[in-house]
Amino acid sequence: MKNPYLPPKDNQKRIFKTPIIVPLLVIMVVVIYAGYIFFYATSEEIGFFAYLKGISFEVFLLCEVGIIYLILYNKKQLDEFLHDFPSIENKHSLECLKPIVRTNMYSSLFMLVFLALGSLTAIMSILNHGLVKGVLVAILSVSAAKLINWYNPSEQKMKHIESSDESLEKELNDILQCWMHKPFPNF
């Protein structure tokens, strides 16, 4: 039986499962906004929430720096790999791909945390730290979104890398299917 995720012979692109990060991001955003509205409506001075409100701008900056660093680091790894191995020709190139996929999976988990905390603190910063910091938050948030859009084509190019050795195609496909889908790979 033909694997539906393998590319057909007429050089069409692979079909990927929906990454597990996608539903988690939607749930995370809903929980963040619902939580913020609940805490803000019930009491502004609840322990950790009150403390986080005071340092929200600094936490937001740390989250944005973390997101930017992860994106640039992953982009550098992808570009170096694609430069060294434009296609998977042997077992060595496949072995070189595995740590990059693993790094991307773990980076995705960290980025999820940074996005969650960054979203919460962005709201707090805009509402509690004045116009200048609010504008800076908006600029940095838009910049991070643009950076993510800049990174996505490289990631897509990597996901559709081809193998010149058909015996390695299944293993390559299995590795690429893990991309942002399995945080704890078993390869």
Image: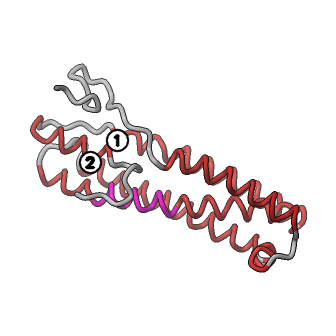
Pointer 2: residues within 10 angstroms few (<14), some, or many (20+)? Answer: some
Q: Answer above or below: position of 13 versus 26.
A: above
Q: Split into 4 quadrants, where in the image is the N terminus?
A: top left
Position above or below: 39 against 27: below
Task: Identify the residue at horizontal 49%, vertical 47% (top origin).
Answer: 151
Q: Secondary structure at mark 1?
A: helix
Residue type of the residue flagged with mark 2: Ile
Whole-number angstrom distance, CA of label 1 to CA of label 2: 10 Å
Density class for disc 1 (Cα within 10 Å; few <14, some 14-19, many ≥20) is many
Most foreground residue, 152 or 118: 118
Above/below status of 163 relative to 63: above
Residue positioned most to the front: 42
User: Would you say 73 lies left or right of 121 here?
Assistant: left
Chain part drawn in magenta: 99-110
Q: Residue furthest top?
A: 10
Q: At 17% from the left edge and 38% from the top edge, which residue is drawn?
A: 169
Q: Which mark is residue 175?
A: 2
Is residue 158 shown left or right of residue 148?
Answer: left
Residue position marked by numbered label 1 in the rendering: 159
